[in-house]
Amino acid sequence: MQQCGWRSVRTAQQLAAAIVCSVRTAGVSCCRELLAAHARLRLPLDAAAAAAVAAAAQRLLQQAAALGPKDVALVLNSSTRCMYSSTRSKFAAAVAAQVPRVAAAMRPQQLALAAHALAAAAARHAAALAAIEAAALQQTDHWTPQDAALLVSSFAKLQVYRHALFAAAAKHGQQQTASYGPQDLALLCSGLAAFGGPLLQQQQLLLLQQRATQLLRRFKGPELALTSFALAKLGCTDTAWLHALADEALYRLAVYRHPSSPLSFSLFDLQQLSTAFIKMHFKDPRLFAVIAQAAKHRLRLLAAGGPQGRGPHRGAPNAQTIACLLHAFGRAGVRDKELLSLLEQQVLLLQQQFSSAGLGMVAAAAAALGIRNQRVWGALQQQGALRGPQMPLDLLVLLLSAVSRGPPKAVSNSFLLAAAARLRLHILLLPAAALAAAVVAFERVRWRDSAFLARAARLLQQQLQQQQQQPQQQQQQQQQLSTRALCGAFSAFAKLAYRDPRVYIHLGREIYQRLHQLTQEDAATVLYALLLLQASSKQQQQQQQQQQQGAGAQHQPLQELDEPSERQQQQQQQQQQQQQQQQQQLGGLDTGHFDGLLLGVLQLLQQQQQQLSAATVSRLQLAGLYLRLYRPELHESLGAPAAALLSRAAAAAAAPAAAAAAAAAAGSGLALSSLLHRSVSRALAAACIPHCSEARVGPLTLDLLLGPQLCLEVWGPTHYYRCTLMRTAAAAFKLTLIQGLGFTVAPLSYLEWQQLQTRDAKIVFLHKLLKDLQQQQQQQQQQQQRQQQQQRQQQQQLEEGSPEKPQALTA
């Protein structure tokens, strides 16, 4: 049957039954031919055939010592096609023990088949592989292209690197490139791309590219995808090969769409093709649009239960295929809604099968493609929280960064808790780039973990100090923190209201040294962080002064009533020392410490003033307003270019302010407001309190303007750090600017508003709040009048005492 090619199922079943009865007396050749017949004819493996194959395999294992070189090669190769995976692995491991005995007598073809069978069974038998390598290296002159390709691809699949074997295969590929067929070339390139990339010289790679271009029309779909992916991993950048491959892929994707065609592409092939184009920096939107259409067609067939074609990787895709395909589409920017919905279904079905790298790739692609499906993000974070204790740190940071760029409503607190706990525990193993990325990710989701921030700041300081002490050659060899990551970490610490000034000093010094490398976005980020730092340091100084005044007022009457004992005096001195240390640590950052960096950033933005984005102009407007209100001496000392830049940015706010006023007059001020804001506005209208929503005052937008110099700020959950009652640095900075403009402002928290269940309770609360605001405004006006009177009196005293000074000196 095997020699004639006659494939009769009934005859095979009768022969299988006869073999089972007489297997005890069967020889090695009979059992070997039975396995070979089932493998070559690809007969269905029913119960009778499985029993016959199992009996023949058991008989072969009993006579393993009598197996010759040909028997070992054929038996191993046949077992890959006529046995189930579990039985095949055990059988291959048992037969592999005989390979060292017969390897010296094997021909190159037999050695290649044995290595291929071991790779298919995932049997990494060290002695067998070493014997195969030694015997193959002695017969390199007799290698055929198939032998070299199978040897290299098998060792690569088993992740076993042998330098001599891979070098010999690369040399054989260079000498006999013209004799390689499509399948041999695909396997050779795949094996060399796994480990032997550095062994290939530019000339060898060029020969492989030329041969691949010649065989382009003869490749099957899987072979073409594998060859393109392997050449991309080897660093192929040849334009001719790239455009020829793109044209061939476009033609096949448009013509050969049926799964049964050997020239068609499966989902696995599409994943390899798209990844190869991404690695070769080829992101033609037309090509990826056609690839997306083919992927949609395959995914529809998969969802409908249609045929996917025959052969390896042509069935249902695994989790790694979906992850790599989604990652490639994310890198190419493919935003097809139907395709993304089909991929989302596959992600939800395979969520428990993704590896840690797959989770990170899917999350990064979902963030890049703007996927808003909360079920997908919830599944990714659930898997991340479950695998957090065992997940590699770099992949955990990748997943955390992707989640921070996803939809804010889909962020899971349980995942953040697990990620923060893992990073705190193993923070010493994180490199500087991963550490900065983690801090930036926590800032995006408003997660303020003081213990993690303290350790991260300490480690960043140490790493920056070590880099500064090293010579320039070692700094170039060592991976430094990128400028984007450096600016992001500086801004993240400021937005998370971290108060230790040392980290800002070290990061600010490093940013100042790299001012020439900053982009416009980086400069705007650093500028806003500097404003937050100056505002927070000023608030801390004011709070410390108030605390000192209050403590002095409390101690005075106590000292008058009774004198403290010596022990109490010592305790008071210790407490005062601790308070001074805390004050030095928290408020030791002077407001003018970063004036040089601020001026450098303004000068950099002034050089790019013709290409400023809207976000950068907004940051410049805030900077000009803050400097004019709280740093007038610095604002006046600015050079002419910087002053002109700030004045132009302030003038750009006139158009938005006019548009906001027109919208408020037309009654559309609540078009972009939150639900909480609208609820408060409706309650104010019911209480008959005149107000204006979203009032524009310079670069600021006041939530609710209640009257002249009276406003109300509505603070929702985004104005607080997650799972805390601490307001964010951005909310405090806006409040500082509003107060500096002379407004009397009161923040209305969502926690207070949610407690008011009835309409009447809301009306009463708002009337009382308005009354308190008016009283506070009167007190502020009276205090300002007193301060003005004191200043006038001081000036008068100075004027009156000025002529008396010479008389006193002469006397």
Image (cartoon, rainbow, N blue to C red):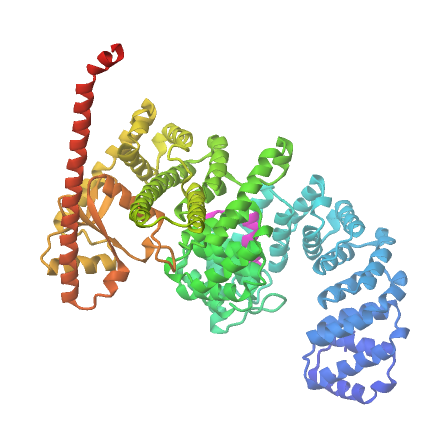
Task: Pick the residue in front: 439 or 483.
Answer: 439
Kindly identify the residue that appears in the image at 27 percent across and 46 percent down: 735
Kindly identify the residue that appears in the image at 36 percent across and 42 percent down: 532
Q: In the figure, residue 220 lies in which quadrant?
A: bottom right
Task: Pick the residue in front: 432 or 170.
Answer: 432
Residue 249 inside the magenta-drawn segment: no
Q: Which residues are magenta?
A: 269-285
Outermost residue to the left? 688
Q: In the figure, residue 17 lies in which quadrant?
A: bottom right
Residue 82 point in image, percent of width and height: 72, 75
Task: Pick the residue in front: 519 or 107.
Answer: 519
Q: In the figure, residue 599 lies in which quadrant?
A: top left
Residue 800, visible in the rendered structure: yes
Please give left or right for residue 337 compared with residue 652 in the image.
right
Q: Quadrant of the C terminus?
A: top left
Residue 62 point in image, percent of width and height: 86, 79
Does residue 342 lie above or below 786 as drawn? Answer: below
Residue 298 point in image, percent of width and height: 50, 65
Residue 678 point in image, percent of width and height: 20, 58
